[in-house]
Image: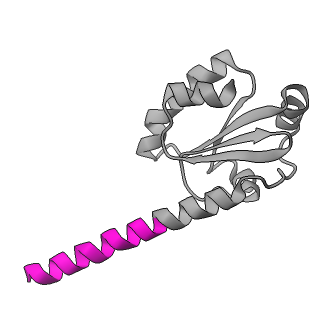
Amino acid sequence: MTTYFGIALTAILLALALLQWRMARKAKKMEGQAVPEIEPEIEQKLRERGRALLYFYSPNCAPCRAMTPRIDQAATRHDNVFKFDVAQSLEIARKLGVMGTPTTLLIADGRIAQVNLGILSEKRLEELLA
């Protein structure tokens, strides 16, 4: 019985690792792509500043609950940080190819410059916004 449990657990862990690898691979393919029309406010900031940070989260996501305060702090220092609850902004998430949360997109010169999956440190956030 424990052998079957071990095999099942291994299969589940392998499937999760494969899914994570697939998401990371797809995220890297997004880099360099042109940004579709999203929201006028963001497009205005892109024209003014040339870059913006888009943060996609879900209230039910534990890593998002850890990262959201960092994003909120960054947003107090930078006016080109935008938060999107994927449940409320599903269309924008789809247009940009967001597959999981937390996801942070750096938009520069009308293109997706960088895609980050998972939690980012405050230092890394500041580097992206500099």
Eyeballing the image, is 125 above or below 54? above
125 inside magenta stretch: no
Q: Horizontal and vertical percent for residue 93?
A: 69, 53
Task: Give the farthest residue toward the left.
Answer: 1
Eyeballing the image, is 101 above or below 29? above
Q: How many marks?
A: 0
Residue 83 or residue 35, whichever sits in front: 35
Identified at 30% across, 77% down, the residue is 11
Magenta: main secondary structure: helix
In this picture the colour scheme is: one colour
Eyeballing the image, is 49 above or below 3? above
Q: Horizontal and vertical percent for residue 50?
A: 85, 31
Task: Give the farthest residue toward the top.
Answer: 77
Eyeballing the image, is 36 above or below 57? below
Identified at 66% across, 41% down, the residue is 84
Tell me which corner region of the image, top left, top right, bottom left or bottom right, holds residue 108: top right
Q: From the image, which quarter does the N terminus lie in?
A: bottom left
Identified at 81% across, 47% down, the residue is 111
Query: Is 65 on the left-hand or right-hand side of 46?
Result: left
Residue 94 or residue 108, whichever sits in front: 108
Q: Horizontal and vertical percent for residue 75?
A: 65, 23
Q: Horizontal and vertical percent for residue 86?
A: 62, 49
Q: From the image, which quarter does the C terminus lie in?
A: top right
18 inside magenta stretch: yes
First to last magenta residue range: 1-19
Identified at 60% across, 24% down, the residue is 126
Query: Is 11 on the left-hand or right-hand side of 108?
Result: left
Residue 34 or residue 41, whichever sits in front: 34
